[in-house]
Image (cartoon, rainbow, N blue to C red):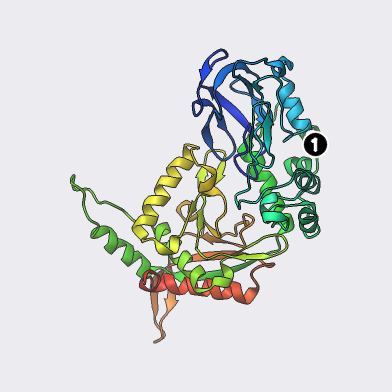
């Protein structure tokens, strides 16, 4: 079972493209997996005959577990392992390379290990940064609860060694235990005992909901949040949107080539604000702060059972029409669970917009390693006093910026939020 992201611990096999006994060529799709974030096809890394399927469609296996045996014609000694043992072994010693005897390739894919077989070596696989994690460092990372993607290597050629993990562990708050995350400190049986039998329906946690519970509980417990709110006049922004949509080029069928939403313009303004105040365009990295060069903006997309936050990268360089098209395409793939890890990993900040639900104002939880998230409320007509003492009505919305105080102090947060407010109220300046 391959690793698809730093937070993915298991995957559900939804479909096998090959059956036991079928011939497999390198690159052939073997099976389809579904995680909390995505659904994707997994190709074969080598050719041979599919000798055995150990995890059938519909079952879940942890990352690193052997899900099948691929035999290239030698003695498939490793295939003698009892069915069902793969999952138990994967839970007990996740990540240990499975070395076959003869010429049968029985490989547990793990991105932090060099995977060896009797006929070759497939690794070492690397972190997104390109650094290699040594086996000892990886074991320590698991024991200390340290995310390897947040660790900078000090070994030869940037290799992450044990001392790097120990240093990161010294400044990292441990996440809440999974049992506490799931039930607020009570077991399922203790919670059920508080209610009459038959008065409730049990809904098992799927991978998405379990991940949301764990990551956001950790975020609330480990990130020192504070919140800044501002009322923004969006009258000029609405005019700009109407003019842009009215003058949009037409295709051959006479249909507009784009139709901007208010959220598209908000993404552009927030990306521009982070460029204007670069100290706020940063993320927390355990023992340091990373100030990012581009404004990569995550956009929360609600789906059945949870949400995704795909990222629009280099948003400050893109036109609003490009942002609009990309946001729509990412939202469609999110709802179809077809996002790839690159689509949602990383980023510098995020936007959560509940205005379409009529929510006037709210505060969002920061998604680590981000240091900010902008919560956008609904537009409304609001009376304001004029300079002459009269009253006029404006279109206004409330935005609330959640800040990680380890990265963004109050004055810095106020500066970037004020810059965003200025871009919204005079939107032409954000497009310059």
Q: How many marks?
A: 1
Furthest toward the bottom, the residue is 388
Picture coordinates of residue 248, whole percent (x, y): 25, 57
The residue lying toward the viewer, choosing from 76 and 420, is 76
Picture coordinates of residue 393, whole percent (x, y): 39, 72
Picture coordinates of residue 326, whole percent (x, y): 40, 51
Q: Name above or below for residue 43 compared with residue 133.
A: above
Q: Is residue 202 visible?
A: no
Q: Residues within 10 Å of mark 1 (few under 14, many from 20)?
A: few
Q: Residue at x 57, y 38 (%)?
A: 305
Q: Name above or below for residue 421 compared with residue 43.
A: below
Q: Is residue 341 visible?
A: yes
Quarter occupied by the C terminus = bottom left
The residue lying toward the viewer, choosing from 69 and 75, is 75
Mark 1 lies on residue: 187
Image check: 58 left or right of 139? Answer: left
**SS category of the residue bearing label 1:** loop
Snapshot quadrant of residue 207: top right
Picture coordinates of residue 201, whole percent (x, y): 66, 29
Q: Residue at x 72, y 36 (%)?
A: 95
Furthest toward the top, the residue is 21
The residue lying toward the viewer, choosing from 203 and 334, is 334
The residue lying toward the viewer, choosing from 283 and 335, is 283
Snapshot quadrant of residue 317: bottom left
Quarter occupied by the N terminus = top right
Image check: 420 left or right of 195? Answer: left
Q: Residue at x 52, y 47 (%)?
A: 342
């Amino acid at each position: 079972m391959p690793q698809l992201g730093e937070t993915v611990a298991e995957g559900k096999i939804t479909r096998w493209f090959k059956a036991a006994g079928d011939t497999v060529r390198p690159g052939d799709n073997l099976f389809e997996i579904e995680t909390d974030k995505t659904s994707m096809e997994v190709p074969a890394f080598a050719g041979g005959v599919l000798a055995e399927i150990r995890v059938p469609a519909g079952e879940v296996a942890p990352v690193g577990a052997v899900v099948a045996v691929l035999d290239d014609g030698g003695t498939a000694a490793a295939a003698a392992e009892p069915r069902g043992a793969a999952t138990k072994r994967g839970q007990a010693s996740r990540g240990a390379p499975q070395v076959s005897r003869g010429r049968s390739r029985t490989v547990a894919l793990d991105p932090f290990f060099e995977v060896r077989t009797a006929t070759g070596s497939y690794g070492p696989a690397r972190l997104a940064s390109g650094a290699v994690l040594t086996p000892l460092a990886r074991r320590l990372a698991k024991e200390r609860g340290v995310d390897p993607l947040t660790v900078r290597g000090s070994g030869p050629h940037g290799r992450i060694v044990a001392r790097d993990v120990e240093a990161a562990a010294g400044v990292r708050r441990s996440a809440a235990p999974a049992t506490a995350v799931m039930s607020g400190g009570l077991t399922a049986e203790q919670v059920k005992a508080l209610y009459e039998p038959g008065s409730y329906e049990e809904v098992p946690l799927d991978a998405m909901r379990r991940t949301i519970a764990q990551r956001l509980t950790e975020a609330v417990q480990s990130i020192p949040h504070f919140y800044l709110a501002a009322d923004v006049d969006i009258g000029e922004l609405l005019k700009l949107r109407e003019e842009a949509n009215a003058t949009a080029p037409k295709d051959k069928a006479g249909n507009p080539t784009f139709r901007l939403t208010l959220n598209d313009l908000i993404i552009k303004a927030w990306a521009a604000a982070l460029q204007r105040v670069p100290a706020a365009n940063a993320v927390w990295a355990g023992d340091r702060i990373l100030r990012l060069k581009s404004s990569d903006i995550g956009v929360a997309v609600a789906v059945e059972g949870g949400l995704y936050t795909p990222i629009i990268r280099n948003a400050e360089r893109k036109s609003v029409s490009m942002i609009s098209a990309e946001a729509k395409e990412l939202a469609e793939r999110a709802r179809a669970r077809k996002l790839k890890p690159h689509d949602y990993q990383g980023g510098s900040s995020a936007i959560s917009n509940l205005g379409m639900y009529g929510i006037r104002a709210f505060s969002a939880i920061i998604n680590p390693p981000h240091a900010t998230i902008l919560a956008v409320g609904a537009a409304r007509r609001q009376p304001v006093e004029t300079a002459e003492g009269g009253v006029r009505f404006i279109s206004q919305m409330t935005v609330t910026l959640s800040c990680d105080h380890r990265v963004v102090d109050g004055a810095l947060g106020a500066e970037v939020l004020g810059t965003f407010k200025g871009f919204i109220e005079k939107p032409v300046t954000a497009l310059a």
